[in-house]
Image: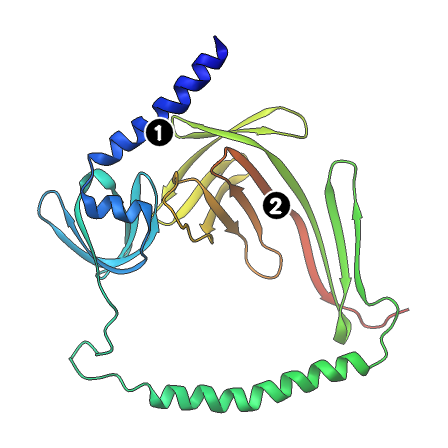
Amino acid sequence: MRCTRVLLSLILIPALIAGSADTLPSSVRKLLVKPRYGPAKITLVDGTHLDGAIFRVTTQFVTVRKSSAGCENIDLKRIAAVEAREVSPYGDDGSFVDAAPYLAFLALTSLIWVPWALGSKLKRSLTPRDHIFGKWQSVSPQGEKDTIEFREQQLVTRSAVAYRTGRYRISDGNVHLNRDSDGEEETLPFRFDCHLLVLNQTSGQLKMLNTLVQRRAAEPIVGHWQYGEGWNPGYWDFRSDGTFRAKVVVGDMMGCLCCLV
């Protein structure tokens, strides 16, 4: 009986998904199968035209940075047609944009920067280094990693991070996290602020930017969501198979050593 239910679900679920996609215009269906990013003209079902740049495609909405100002998550059901725009070599006034000066500047910069970078790397490899230089790490039984790194020019960095893994599910505007470590479930309200994922944690709101370019449209929460600035950002990685992995930054520090003992 259980095998029969599994077989039916394997047959019916893809059919239901395909049926819901069939109600969308052909240009929208093509966008879901093979997302195209960049300039586009979007026609809504009410006849309104939007000019902007598509930079995220999900199974529920398309995120568009509008030409006027700001950005918007447009529900797929509101879209009548999507037309990709090619990037023109001409400026807004119709004049040809001459790239020769920019290419010459890049070539000159490369001629200066490449030898300097190679020389610096060779110098570092030949310079005797103190035995303390390098990255040192300790791992607690709970999986928290405390890393301290001694760099050149008396720089030292220290970071304490905790990695969490488990499974998640979505319902009523909440993401339910079931952690592998203890099996307990944590419920966090979430929303999308245009291209940002906002998690409402007990410690406050956490706004994260997706850094994963999807090759095929997925659920809106699927992605590699990064937060924090600098050398040690944290992230939440929600995968399409219902699993997640998170890097939670407990604390970090960067400073300078006056002397090495």
Q: Which residue in the structure is indicated by mark 1?
A: 14
Mark 1 or mark 2: whose residue is earlier in sequence: 1
Q: Amino acid at mark 2?
A: Lys
Residue displayed at 19% across by 44% down: 26
- Residue 128 higher or lower than 145, as above or below: below
Direction from residue 86 to residue 188 in the image, left or right? right
Question: Label 1 crowding class (10 Å Cα cut-off): few <14, some 14-19, many 20+?
Answer: few
Question: Which of the 4 image quarters holds residue 155?
Answer: bottom right
Tell me, for residue 25, which label it has, or none: none
- Residue 257 higher or lower than 118, as above or below: above
Q: Say which of 50 and 159 sits in front.
A: 50
Question: Which of the 4 image quarters holds residue 112?
Answer: bottom right
Mark 1, mark 2: which one is toward the viewer?
1
Cα–Cα gap, marks 1 and 2: 33 Å
Direction from residue 37 to residue 241 in the image, left or right? right
Q: Which residue in the structure is indicated by mark 2?
A: 247
Q: Amino acid at mark 1?
A: Pro
Q: Quadrant of the C terminus?
A: bottom right
Residue displayed at 62% across by 57% down: 232
Q: Is there CB contact under 8 Å for labels 1 and 2? A: no
Direction from residue 236 to residue 51 in the image, left or right? left
- Position of residue 191 measured from the top left corner of the image (x, y, whole percent): 39, 38
Question: Label 2 crowding class (10 Å Cα cut-off): few <14, some 14-19, many 20+?
Answer: some
Q: Say which of 55 and 195 sits in front.
A: 55
- Position of residue 14 measured from the top left corner of the image (x, y, whole percent): 35, 29
- Position of residue 18 measured from the top left corner of the image (x, y, whole percent): 29, 32
